[in-house]
Amino acid sequence: MVDIHSHVLYGLDDGAKDKEMSIAMLRLAAANGTTDIVATPHSDLKYPFKPDEIEEQLAEFAKLDDVPRIHRGCDFHLSFDNIQDLFEHPLRYTINGHGYLLVEFANQAIPARIGDVLRRMLGMGICPVITHPERNALLANGLLQIAEWVESGCRVQVTAQSFAGRFGKSAQVAARNLMDRDLVHFVASDAHDLENRPPTLRAAFQSVSSEYGEERADALFRTNPAKVLTGQPVTIAAKGFAKPRQWFKLW
């Protein structure tokens, strides 16, 4: 399986606290069937994005032979300064420097003109991946808005543990509502530690496979996220829309 959202690098945000925890998280991911994992440190008002430190850790962990392949990414908060820097340096935050960018919405409010920002990203060849909308009450209650963003070219990632109720009943129900409307393109761990939010996908894969079929589970945990690593288009359309919009390449 391929995990496109994790906080396995140490000392950069509220994820792994030290090198030993990073290694333990990576080994746990491998033992749970993850072959590739994207390290996505936060970039927000509390945690500045540090590309040089990220590259150093990626090179360090690449020497280990019992961990998944580790890729570069970012958990990108949609703040004004972040967005401006993204427009100036579009390859800085995207996964492996290709076209996909994990975008995180604030829980308190959704800016009125955020649709314009997403459209500008798409016009630049950046595909915004809306992270864990089931855990954001504003997004969870706005399925029509999410469907419109998906139709325009955005994609959606749900957290694996949401299917088991880890983030509460409302998030669990919202995850299934998104699934029922074909508004989920990736399932990822959003791992932060070894116990409360571990880098494990197997239980969620089995749950999705049982409820929605193995073919769909394979797409959400393997095929689609593997395409993200190399910037290939994920062209699944939401119900009610005839086809996805034009895919623009960033490179």
Image (spheres, rainbow, N blue to C red):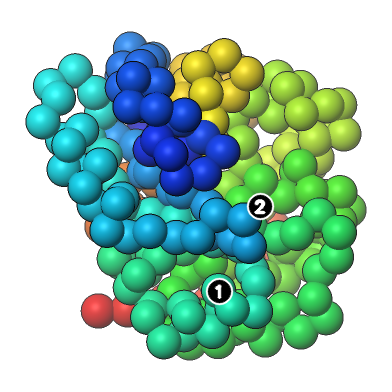
Q: Is residue 235 above or below residue 60?
A: below
Q: Are marks 2 and 1 in contact (CB under 8 Å)?
A: no
Q: Is residue 201 visible?
A: no
Q: Quadrant of residue 179?
A: top right
Q: Nearer the viewer, mark 2 or mark 1?
A: 1
Label 1: how many residues lie within 10 Å, few (<14), some (14-19) or many (20+)? some
Nearer the N terminus, badge 2 or badge 1?
1
Residue type at mark 1 is Asn
**Is 132 situated left or right of 167 in this image?**
left
Q: Which residue is mark 2?
A: 183
**Quarter containing the C terminus:** bottom left
Residue at the spot 12% in from the left edge and 21% down from the top edge? 65
- SS of the residue under disc 1: helix
**Is 119 situated left or right of 111 in this image?**
left
Viewer-proximal residue among 21 and 4: 21
Residue at the spot 62% in from the left edge and 56% down from the top edge? 46
Q: Is residue 132 visible?
A: yes
**Quarter containing the N terminus:** top left
Residue at the spot 32% in from the left edge and 79% down from the top edge? 250
Residue type at mark 2 is Leu
Q: Is residue 87 above or below residue 40?
A: below
In 3D space, how far apart are the residues under numbered discs 2 and 1 (Cα atoms)? 26 Å
Residue at the spot 10% in from the left edge and 31% down from the top edge? 63
Residue 34 point in image, percent of width and height? 34, 25
Viewer-proximal residue among 53 and 80: 53
Label 2: how many residues lie within 10 Å, few (<14), some (14-19) or many (20+)? many
Residue 124 point in image, percent of width and height? 43, 85
- SS of the residue under disc 2: loop
Residue 175 point in image, percent of width and height? 73, 38
Q: Which label was assigned to residue 82?
A: 1
